[in-house]
Amino acid sequence: MNAMPDDREVGEAWERFVVEQVYPEPQTKARDDYRNYDAPGRETVREFYRQNHREQTYEFVLAKKRDYLRFCRREMSVFEALEYLNTLVDDSDPDIDLTQINHLLQTSEAVRAAGHPDWFVLTGLLHDLGKVLCLFGEPQWAVVGDTFPVGCGYSQRIVYPEFFAENPDAQDPRFQSRCGVYEEGCGLRNVHLSWGHDEYLYHRMKDFLPEPALYMIRFHSFYAWHREGEYDWLCDDHDREMLPWVQAFNPFDLYTKAPVEPDWTSLRPYYEQLIDRYLPPTLAW
């Protein structure tokens, strides 16, 4: 695997590349304009997080894992899943309202342009594929958005932390200490995050992709950890070893969003062979 650059260097280099070559003005926003939750560009965002923070309880997450991680709803190819995402706009995204397949292609093409390994490119294409949970009737507040640990205290660095006051777990002393139901240094693999597409897709892909790719998929929405530096007390040394990979992925996921639709028809042959290299023809979802 390639040696990991400093995540700040990655972010700055990628921003220059996006601004100068991929999405020149006026399409590209300034970096500080992304993830602006004080004045989100879409009215759905605040209400989304109000519902998300109210409903994502410890017991809710455990029940969803018992249900969905059986993967018994349908057989579907990756391309069928991608075609579904062509109908989905993420209500939690404050930046843009393109369908999800366009966001995935913007991400993966940026990773490819930066010269990263093919598994990294594939991760860019797949990272939000777990949003097919909406296809099974799940509301978006149980599928998308920033993730956070349940079963322990809420960080004030989570987006809209004030909405946790409506969550029943906020009144349960078992869940409101620093570690809650967990032990310090237990490792994130033993911590339950709010339910959504990240955890679902991680379990679907864990037999097929390298470990850094799996961390990118599982934790790319856990901004309180990889961006704000929170919850390190729950991490073990392996989490800290993998953190730079998640941070290296983040600029591609976040700063490539622009109102320019990639040409899926011309790109599809490349991604067909890439998917065939790593994944079986169909998967149970």
Image (cartoon, helix red, strand yellow):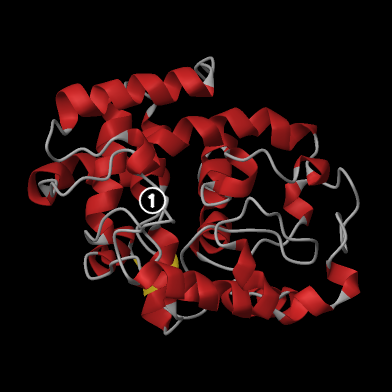
The number of numbered badges drawn on the structure is 1
Residue under the image location 39 percent in, 59 percent down:
129
Which residue position is annotated with label 1?
Answer: 126
Residue 127 shown left or right of residue 164 in the figure: left
x and y percentages locating residue 106 in the rendered image = 25, 43
- Kindly identify the amino acid type of the residue bearing the numbered disc 1: Leu
The residue most toward the front is 38
Examine the image and state in which quarter residue 56 appears: bottom right
Q: Is 92 or 285 nearer to us in this picture?
A: 92
x and y percentages locating residue 98 in the rendered image = 21, 59
Q: Is residue 134 above or below residue 37?
A: below
Examine the image and state in which quarter residue 101 appears: bottom left
Residue under the image location 15 percent in, 43 percent down:
267
User: Is residue 152 shown to the viewer in this render?
Assistant: yes
Q: Is residue 244 above or below residue 162?
A: above
Q: Is 80 or 35 nearer to us in this picture?
A: 35
Q: Is 221 or 161 nearer to us in this picture?
A: 161
Examine the image and state in which quarter residue 152 appears: bottom right
Q: Is 186 or 265 nearer to us in this picture?
A: 186
